[in-house]
Structures are given as structure tokens and as C-alpha cells.
Amino acid sequence: MPSPIAHSVSGYILGKILPWEYTKVSRHEKLYLQLYTIFVAIFADFDFIPQLLTGEKFHRGLTHSIFFSFIFSSIVAFFISNRWNKSYKQIFIFTFIIYCSHLSLDFFTAGGKGMQLFLPFTNSFFKSPIPIFPPVKHSSGLWELSHIITLSFELIYSALLVLGLSYWQRFKTHHKTRL
């Protein structure tokens, strides 16, 4: 599965390209919004906390389901729409897309049995037949040499996303000035 690096960068990039009303947001709130997108993008992996407390396996379970992403986005949108005086619908869609980016990245990861995308409706595991991200061998420990391959892949993936965002912003700015 991708590490927090790939999830964070993907969420950050989505936060920059999704249609979002920045004009009525203060400078501090822009920073909070950027941190918010990163938090939402990695939130599914906070399922390690109950696993640490109970010893039960939770990873890639309920927090990696579309149902949970819908519930999470609904609750968060309720609180944030009141705080920033923004549209509930806009925040819900924004949050849902960013949360689902996590599920998408994990879906395209090699190794493992997949994730339970449709919990609580079915216990079946799903994963892409065409993996994009290399597997992580958690059982091998933190200092496993094969992790270098995974981290290198994710750093290249992240660099390409940031480069793509840069080109997209320049393209957008260039076309705005021409109109």
C-alpha cells in the first residue's frame, strides 16, 4: 500500500485542483485547508490505532470502505460548513473525493488480499488486477531493504504529481491572462 507520502501528496494535489472557493478564505484558513486535505487523504490509515489497542486486525477494513468514506465526509462536512460558512454539499463532495483518493491508491497496490471496499454490505476483499504501486512487506520490519523500492516509486510518483500541478497552474494562469 502507498505510504502517507503518496496519500498526502495526492490529497494535497486534489485540494489544489478541485473547484473550491478560495476567495472568501483568509490566509490562515488556506493553510488549514491544505492541512485538512492531507489529513483527509491519510485518515483511512488511522485504523492502526484500534489495532494497537486491541490487537485485532483492522487495516483495510471499515475505514477503507466507500460506506465509511460517505459517513466520514457527511460528518466532517457538517462541522466544517458551519465553521467556514461554506456549502455543505461542496465540502461533502470535496472531502469525499479526497478520501476516496486514498481508497483508489490502495486499490492499485500489489500484494495483500485487497481491501473491503463494500463493508458493511459484504466482507469480500477487492484489489486491482493491474497493480500500480509496489507492495510493502510490513512483516519484514521497518528497515527492510525492499522498502527503498517502494519509497523511490512513491517519491517519483509524488514528484510527477507536483510537477503536473505546476504545469497545470502555469497553463491556467497563462490562459487567464490571454482572455
Image: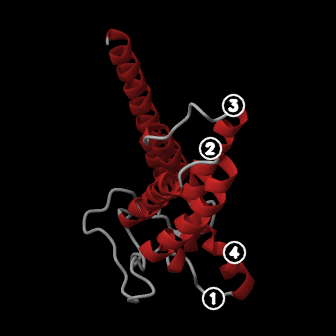
Residue occupied by mark 4? 49
Q: Which mark is residue 33?
A: 2
Labels 3 and 4: the sequence-earlier one: 3
* Residue drawn where x is 49% and y is 38% of the image: 16
Labels 4 and 1: the sequence-earlier one: 4
Secondary structure under tag 3 reads helix
Q: Amino acid at mark 3?
A: Arg
* Residue drawn where x is 55% and y is 34% of the image: 22
* Residue drawn where x is 53% and y is 43% of the image: 12
Residue occupied by mark 1? 56
Q: Which callout, 2 or 1, points to the residue nearer the camera?
A: 2
Quote the CA–CA distance across marks 2 and 4. 24 Å
Kindly tell me whether residue 145 is visible in this rendering: no
Q: Which callout, 3 or 1, points to the residue nearer the camera?
A: 3
Q: Is residue 132 above or below residue 55?
A: above
Labels 2 and 4: the sequence-earlier one: 2
Q: Amino acid at mark 4?
A: Ile
Secondary structure under tag 4 reads helix
Image coords of residue 103 (percent x, y): 43, 64
Q: Is residue 76 above or below residue 171?
A: below
Q: Quadrant of the C terminus?
A: top left
Secondary structure under tag 2 reads helix
Residue sitting nearer the eye, 91 or 126: 91
Q: Amino acid at mark 2?
A: Leu
Residue occupied by mark 3? 27
Quote the CA–CA distance across marks 2 and 3. 10 Å
Quote the CA–CA distance across marks 3 and 4. 33 Å
Image coords of residue 33 (percent x, y): 62, 44
Quote the CA–CA distance across marks 2 and 1. 33 Å
